[in-house]
Image (cartoon, helix red, strand yellow):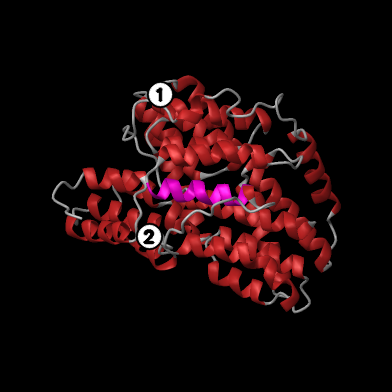
């Protein structure tokens, strides 16, 4: 049971991370919403699809963390796993850092259990330590290697522009949810919002467990997809649905704050951002609030927040340079520190050669005036068959880039 939970966490974390490119601020899709967004029951409400109460889940996690106070390997692994699961809900960087530290320490022991190795692989991959994650998976007994195939495939998808595979004639029995999740990601990478939304819509009906987070995650991914395609107004209800099921779910909350700012609901957006910042301590969200305040005309407050975010990013880059080689780039572009943005995006492209890494580097090159270099990166993305929304935005800003 624990192994299955860890593999599920790994898949969800990598899929979420794959959606890291910044959303577009201009509509590039049709002015009418995807067909499934007009259907009743989407997203599923808490009343229509009952799951365990999120506060009960958190209470259980809090209890496990409090009880796991011993120093033996098993107890330490239990504490790390519970901290990481709580991080997946609340987004506290303190939880993430402690879970990372303990998992790394336990996995370094030659007597580390399979569960401990899988936990370390999960957390390491989330922080873009793909080689560390692979090394941990390789230490699992031969009899358990087949259980890691999906995890390894998710890491491969996160690191490379894999050729798009034709969809199977039928969804695999028992694997429908994972398959639809992957198909939705492929649809986004091909720039097809209708296709992605249809897969997200179908996926919610194949979730049969009692935990609330997977459904909240699905609705959040639909919202992020709509936001990436330039439709924050359509995305808001999906983030609200996720928060109705899992209050304080940080991933939904921070994106809701962003959408509210983009649609002019500054007061509510500010309140959402301030809450999620206090909950997580994440400099990305401090920078997000700065963006909202700038849109609202509060330039002095925006500058104060940018200073706070800059200090926070510097600290995170010192602790986890590989993870923040991706996550900090847009902040440095927006604040005019192009040299740092170039260095980080270059390192990110060394770590992972997926479409998002190429497009992030192309974005930095374009901002730095290196149009030819940016166009060459776009050409590589196009040759691999990818057309995510960020691709279209970059191409529109380079009319002389012929692909």
> Looking at the image, can residue 321 be seen?
no
What residue is shown with label 2? 344
Q: Residue at the spot x=82%, y=65% of the render?
A: 74
Considering the numbered disc 2 on the image, is that residue within a helix, a strand or a loop? helix
Q: Which residue is mark 1?
A: 263
Across and down, in percent, residue 274 comes to 54, 31
Q: Does residue 370 appear left or right of residue 354 in this picture? A: left
Q: Does the magenta segment cover residue 183?
A: yes
Residue 185 in view (yes/no): yes
Pick the residue in front: 9 or 103: 9
Task: Give the residue drawn at x 44%, y 47%.
Answer: 187
Residue at point 71%, 38% (across, down): 212
Asked if residue 129 is positioned above or below residue 382 in the image, the reply reads: below
Answer yes or no: do the residues labelled 2 and 1 have beta carbons within 8 Å?
A: no
Q: Position of residue 157 (x, y in %)?
A: 49, 61
Q: Quadrant of the N terminus?
A: bottom right
Q: Quadrant of residue 133?
A: bottom right
Q: Nearer the viewer, mark 2 or mark 1?
A: 1
Question: Residue 156, which numbered label?
Answer: none
Q: Is residue 38 magenta?
A: no
Q: Pinpoint residue 400: horizontal percent, then vertical percent.
A: 13, 50
User: Which residue of the protein is positioned furthest toward the left in this rendering?
Assistant: 400
Give whichever of 171, 13 is nearer the camera: 171
What segment is highlighted magenta in the picture?
A: 177-190
Give the alpha-carbon distance from disc 2 to disc 1, as whole Å: 30 Å
């Amino acid at each position: 049971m624990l192994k299955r939970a860890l593999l599920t966490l790994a898949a969800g974390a990598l899929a979420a991370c794959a959606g890291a490119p910044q959303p577009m601020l201009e509509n590039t899709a049709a002015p009418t919403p995807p067909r499934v967004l007009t259907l009743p029951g989407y997203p599923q409400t808490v009343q229509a699809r009952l799951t365990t109460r999120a506060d009960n889940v958190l209470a259980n996690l809090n209890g496990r963390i409090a009880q796991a106070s011993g120093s033996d390997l098993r107890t330490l692994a239990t504490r790390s796993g519970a901290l990481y699961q709580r991080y997946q809900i609340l987004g506290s960087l303190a939880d993430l850092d402690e879970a990372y530290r303990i998992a790394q320490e336990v996995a370094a022991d030659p007597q580390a259990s399979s569960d401990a190795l899988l936990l370390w692989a999960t957390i390491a991959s989330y922080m873009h330590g793909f080689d560390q994650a692979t090394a941990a998976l390789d230490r699992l007994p031969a009899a358990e290697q087949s259980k890691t195939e999906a995890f390894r495939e998710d890491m491969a998808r996160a690191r490379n522009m894999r050729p798009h595979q034709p969809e199977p004639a039928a969804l695999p029995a028992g694997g429908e949810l994972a398959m639809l999740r992957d198909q939705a990601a492929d649809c986004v990478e091909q720039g097809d919002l209708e296709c992605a939304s249809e897969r997200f819509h179908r996926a919610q009906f194949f979730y049969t467990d009692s935990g609330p987070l997977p459904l909240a995650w699905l609705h959040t991914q639909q919202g992020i997809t709509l936001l990436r395609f330039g439709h924050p107004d359509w995305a808001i209800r999906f983030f609200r649905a996720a928060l109705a099921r899992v209050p304080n779910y940080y991933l939904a909350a921070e994106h809701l704050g962003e959408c509210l700012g983009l649609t002019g609901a500054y007061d509510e957006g500010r309140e959402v951002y301030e809450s999620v910042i206090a909950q997580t301590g994440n400099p990305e969200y401090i920078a997000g609030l700065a963006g909202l305040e700038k849109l609202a005309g509060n330039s002095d407050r925006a500058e104060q927040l940018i200073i706070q975010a800059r200090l926070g990013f510097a600290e995170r880059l010192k602790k986890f340079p590989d993870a923040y080689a991706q996550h900090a780039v847009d902040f440095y572009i927006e604040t005019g520190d192009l040299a740092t943005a170039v260095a980080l995006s270059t390192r990110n492209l060394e770590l992972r050669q997926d479409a998002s890494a190429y497009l992030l580097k192309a974005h930095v090159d374009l901002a730095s005036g290196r149009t030819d270099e940016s166009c060459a990166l776009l050409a590589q993305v196009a040759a691999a068959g990818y057309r995510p929304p960020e691709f279209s935005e970059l191409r529109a800003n380079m009319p002389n880039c012929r692909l």
